[in-house]
Image: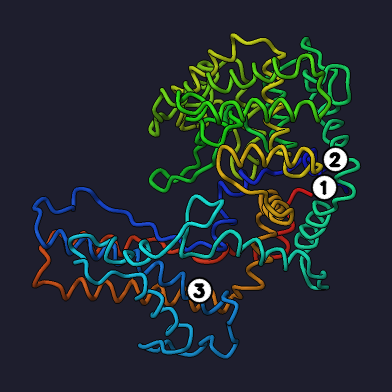
Amino acid sequence: MSNLQGFFKQMESDDDINNVHDVGKDIWDLKFVMMEDNENKPKNKNYGVCAFWCLMMLLLVIAGLVFAIVYLTLIGPNMKAEEVQTGPVSTVCNNSACVSLSHSLLQTMDSSVKPCDDFYDYACGNWIKNTIVPDGRDQATTMYSDMDRQQDLRVLFEAPDKLDEPEAIKKARTFYDSCMDKETREANGIDVINGGVEGVFGGWPILESNPGGNFNADNFDMTTLMTGLFVHAGSTSIARATAKYYEDTEEFKLEISAGKFSTMPNIEYLVGNNYQKEQDALLDYVTNAALILGANPSIARQEMGAVVNLETKLAQAYLDNQPTPDNVMTVREMQAMYPDIDWTVFLTTLIPESVATITDDFKVVNVDGDYLTEAFRILSEEPARLLADWMLWLCYHDAMPYLNDEIRNNYYEFLAIVEGTPVREYYQDCVDLVHKLLPSATARLYADAYLPTESQSLIDGIAENIRTTLTDLIGKSSSFMVVSAKEAAKAAVKEAIISVGVPDYVRENGALNKSIWM
C-alpha cells in the first residue's frame, strides 16, 4: 500500500478516538487537573492566601515530580531493571534515579526568591536564566521532548514484528514502512493523491482537465464534500465536533467548534498589517504547490489568491467573535440556524454510533456559534468553484509532508518563513502521521516498551501517597492558614484527577484491534 492511500481509506478519525479518551497524550503526559470551588476561596489577602496558593503550586510541582520519576525510572535511557521497586514503597527514595532527579530539581530553583513573593520564579528561576531555546524551536521544556518521543517511536516502528503482538501494532508498522518508502513516494505520490481527489471528491477545480481535476460545479454539495473529506482524509475545514461526557448531567454532548479553515499556522498573520512577509510567503507557497500538482500557470496565482482571501475573511470572523461555551442547543436548532449543512448526516459521520446516536433532539454545545453564523454568511456568497478549491486545498496541504521532495521542500520553505521551523527528518513526519491516524496502536506499542502494567500500578500508588501526604500537611498547617483556605486546599487535593499511562482497552488485544480503521 502506498504511503498516501491511507488518506483515502475510510477511517474512524483520530478525533473520534481522542474525543473519548486522548490516548496519544495520556501515554507521555501526566495530567493533574485541579478543580476549585470559587465560593470557598478566602476573601482576605494575607499569608493564609499565600500559603494556599503555595500549596496549590506545590501540588503542580509534585505532579511534575511524579512525571519525572516516570521518565527517569521507566523511560530514561539509563534505566536498570533492578532499580524498579516492586515491594513496599519506602519513605525515602535514594536510588540513582531519585538522587539525579533531586539534583536536577534543585538546579532549576532560585532559592534567593521568597516563594510567597513569586513561587514560579522560586521554583523555576535558575532554569529560565540558564536555558537557551534551540534554533528552529519557539520554546524549551524540561519534559520529555517531541524529538525524544519521535526517536523512541521510530525504534519501535522499525523493530521486527513479534508473534504475540496484536494485529493493530503490526498494521501500524506496515503503515510506517509505507510512509517511509521514498521510491514509491517520488514516483507515484502526486498521482495517488490526485487520483483520490478526482475519484472520491469530484476533482480539484484549479487542476481543470488535468489529473485530479474535472470538477463539475453542478454536482457540488457542501455536506457531501465536508463528510467525504472527514471520512477519507480527516479534514474539517468548516466545523468539527468533539464528543464529551458531562458528569453533572450524566450524558454525552457534542461540542461544535470551528474547523481548520486556514493554511496559515497563526491566523493573526492573515489579518495583521505587520505581517506582509508571512502573507507573501503564504501566497507563494499555495501557488507553487498548485503548480507542482498540475495547475495551469495562467490561473494558479489568481485562483489560489482567492483561496487565501477567503481564509483571511474567515480568520477575521473568528477573531471578531468570542466563544460561547454555554451555548447548548439541539441538532434541530442547529439545522434551522445553519441550513447549508445537513447536520444529522455530518455529525453521524463524525461521531461513531458506539459513542452517540445523533437525533434531532440530541444536544450539542455550539462553542463557536457566533463565528459559524458569520462563516456561513461568508461562504454563502462564494461560488462553488472557490469553495471546492478552498476545502480541497486544505486536504492537499495536510498531505504536503508525505509527497515528493519538491513539494515537501516547498512546504518547509513556507514554514521556515512563518514559524522558523527547519526541515524535519522524514521519519519524524511518518511517526507523527502514524500516531495521528492510529493513536491507540501507537499508545499500546509505547506502553508495552516503557510502561508495563506493574509499573503503572506502582506510579498510581506513588500519586495516591502524594495526595495523602498533602492532605496531612494541610491539616497540620493551622498556625498559618485560615480555616477557609485550609478547607479549600483540602478540597482541591481531594478532587485532583491523576491520569497516568493508557486506558484498559488499549492493553486488550481484541478491543485495540477494533479501534483501528485499516
Q: Quadrant of residue 110?
A: bottom left
Pointer 2 local density, CA inside 10 Å: few below 14, some 14–19, many at least 20: many
Label 2 SS: helix
- Disc 1 vs disc 2: Cβ atoms closer than 8 Å? yes
Pointer 3 local density, CA inside 10 Å: few below 14, some 14–19, many at least 20: many
**Residue underneath mark 2:** 189
**Residue underneath mark 1:** 3
Rendered position, 404 above or below 388: below
Q: Quadrant of residue 447?
A: bottom right
| Residue 70 marker | 3
Mark 3: amino acid: Val
Label 1 SS: loop
State how far apart marks 1 and 3 are (Cα): 34 Å
Counting labels gives 3
Mark 2: amino acid: Gly
Q: Position of residue 478 (x, y in %)?
A: 11, 71
